[in-house]
Amino acid sequence: MPGSADAADRDLPALHSALAGWFASTARPLPWRAADRTPWGVLVSEVMLQQTPVVRVLPVWQEWLERWPGPSDLAREPAGEAVRAWGRLGYPRRALRLHAAAVAIRDNHGGQVPGDYAALLALPGVGSYTAAAVASFAFGRRETVVDTNIRRVHARLLSGTALPSPALTAAEMRLAAQVLPDDVSSSVRWNASVMELGALVCTARSPKCGQCPVRDSCAWLAAGEPPPTYTPKGQSWHGTDRQVRGAVMAVLRAADEPVEPELFGRAPADLGFEAAGIGIPLAALHRLNCAPEQLERALAGLLGDGLAELHPGGLRLPS
DNA sequence: GAATCGTGGTA
DNA sequence: TTACCAAGATT
């Protein structure tokens, strides 16, 4: 029974209580956690927060919820509007999938975000984490929520390691399920508390153990803070197709009209496109000075992903 | 299971 | 300046 020893000798009620108290006094007042939150607002926040820091999500989330208060409001818009309103949050496929999720919610769920884990998981762009998070935080269900923060807290507090394994394992899910409070409302609070602890105190680099409400129970501290057993592999950026894709998307977001593909490979200064409103992103793309075949690859990738469409007048965001 | 997919802040 | 990192999902 591997994995069961981690939590077996723990006073779980004490941990639950300690983190609940800490959360009540310390948690950030995020709008998607406010009393007037809606399931749609929670879903939008969870998708935006995938690999994106809270501070950058906040203003975009506000704009989205004012413009599209419910899934049906977004569903009646072209997908390109979602991509444009996504702004610079990154990973624009998330915007495309969130729009597709809104359509699915309108068509298959009467315009109401479903509360069941399985139904949520079936929505585009919603994986195991997001489905559990929405079910827990928006609907008060008892679900085992495991994100990067919770994985790191569990690794230190319960398993005594500096970092979780590179990929989510079945053992981690079992452990998380073991320590989840039985009581439904306590389970929701626990999920939010552990996540918040990971975000504010038990951070990836230089954790603030002096502020930790459960430091006396921490297996990693007890073990003398052993270093990570592996070095995380960094995400390359400069010179990659991703960088070119990002630069192309910036041009399309700024363009009011379709952009002729050949403009992407030419110097904007020679074209006089400042007036068209796409001069700056076009210049940024040109500054990359990427090979023609790389640009071709990036454009083909965006077309294949549905992030761009080719029309007689040129390339534009999807309709 | 590994690779891919944006962006900007921070150490 | 470079490299890590942030409420992952999909293929």
Image: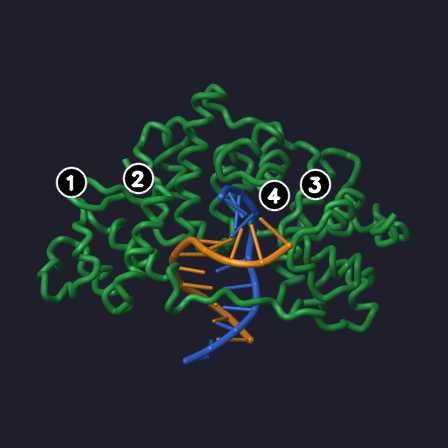
Chain colours: A green, B orange, C blue
Which quadrant of the rendered structure holds the C terminus of chain A?
A: top left
Marks 4/3: CA–CA distance: 9 Å
Q: Is residue A159 shown left or right of residue A127?
A: right
Marks 2/3: CA–CA distance: 34 Å
From the image, tell me which residue sits under label 2. Answer: A81
The structure residue drawn at horizontal position 88% and vertical position 53%, both measured from the top left corner, is A5
Q: To which chain does the residue with label 2 belong?
A: A
Mark 4 crowd level (few <14, some 14–19, many ≥20, 10 Å Cα): some
A47 to A113, vertically: above or below: below
Residue A11 x/y as whole percent? 87, 50
Question: Same subunit under labels 1 and 4?
Answer: yes
* Secondary structure at numbered mark 3: loop
Marks 2/4: CA–CA distance: 26 Å
The structure residue drawn at horizontal position 75% and vertical position 46%, both measured from the top left corner, is A176
Question: Same subunit under labels 1 and 2?
Answer: yes
Q: Which image quadrant is residue A145 in? A: top right
Q: To which chain does the residue with label 4 belong?
A: A
* Secondary structure at numbered mark 1: loop
From the image, tell me which residue sits under label 1. Answer: A312
* Secondary structure at numbered mark 2: helix
From the image, tell me which residue sits under label 3. Answer: A144
Marks 1/3: CA–CA distance: 49 Å
From the image, tell me which residue sits under label 4. Answer: A129
| Type of amino acid at the residue the image marks with label 2 | Glu
Residue A86 x/y as whole percent? 37, 46
Question: Same subunit under labels 2 and 3?
Answer: yes
Q: Which numbered disc flags the more N-terminal residue, 1 or 2?
A: 2
Q: To which chain does the residue with label 3 belong?
A: A
Question: Same subunit under labels 2 and 4?
Answer: yes
| Type of amino acid at the residue the image marks with label 1 | Pro
**Are dots 1 and 3 in contact, CB under 8 Å?**
no
Residue A42 x/y as whole percent? 52, 38
